Image: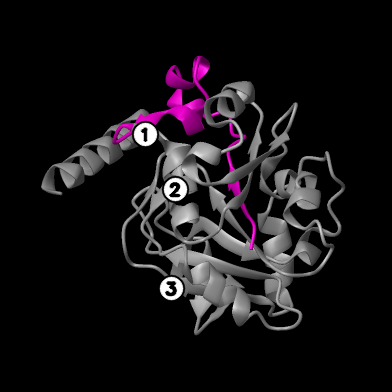
Amino acid sequence: MRAMILAAGRGERMRPLTDVCPKPLLKAGGKPLLQWHIEALVQAGIIEIVVNHAHLGQQIAAYFGDGQSLGARLMYSAESTALETAGGIAQALHLLNPDHLDTPFLVINGDVHCDWPVKKALDIEQSWAPGQQAHLVMVPNPDHNPAGDFELQGHTVHDRTGHEGAFTFSGIGLYAPSLFQAVVPGTVFKLAPLLRSAMQQGTVTGELHTGRWMDIGTPARLDELNQLLQHKAGRV
């Protein structure tokens, strides 16, 4: 299995920190945010990893290089302008799916921190059903997204109907290449419309993760994560 870490966001809410440093290189617990994801993937046995980048992206490639020092094989998908999630994935599809098979790959938002066991992705791949297009990891709604994103009914994900029971999409998911077949590489395209279309077809599964999850979208949340990781390291 191959994986992609989304790292092309501008990080507007992180300014002024991101005026001179791309958000994935901001540090928490002594490591860049991106490094936590790379290490988790490698530990799970997923070493072929695509990283997309745009704003100050050359710093990311210069910092991690080919990934060999972390036990990974990193590939980069450069975007002159950030293409949003689906656009970025479509641009990198030739790296994620070199054999042109409709087998799933894992995608992780670079600005989340989560203790979801990445190795589960390999089990999900093994049980992937014919015609399935996505599997989403959902989390309980944080204060900054109280209404949630999608509803989880059993193992099937549906669009939010406005009733209670919706959860927040964690930014971690597995996708079949066919989900992006309508997206022209190089165009800006959001992921949510593709997912909602697939949900109408009943081809999106999901699970609820109740462990630690944080959206590192602001300096305050970065500081919170830094303190959490330092405290955790102090106990080891």
Q: Amino acid at mark 2?
A: Glu
Q: Position of residue 30 (x, y in %)?
A: 31, 32
Disc 2 secondary structure class: helix
Which residue bears the numbered disc 2? 39
Mark 2 or 1, nearer chain start = 1
Q: Is residue 116 left or right of residue 63?
A: left
Kindly identify which numbered label has been placed on residue 90.
none
Identify the disc placed on residue 31.
1
Instruction: Note whether 158 is above or below 231 in the view shown.
Output: below
Q: At numbered mark 3, what does the secondary structure look like: helix, strand or loop?
A: loop
**Marks 2 and 1 in Cβ contact (< 8 Å):** yes
Instruction: Classify 10 Å Cα crowding around label 3: few (below 14), some (14-19), many (20 and above).
Output: some
Position of 32 compared to 192: left or right? Answer: left
Q: Which residues are magenta?
A: 1-30
Tell me the kind of residue under disc 1.
Answer: Lys
The mark nearer the N terminus, 2 or 3, is 2
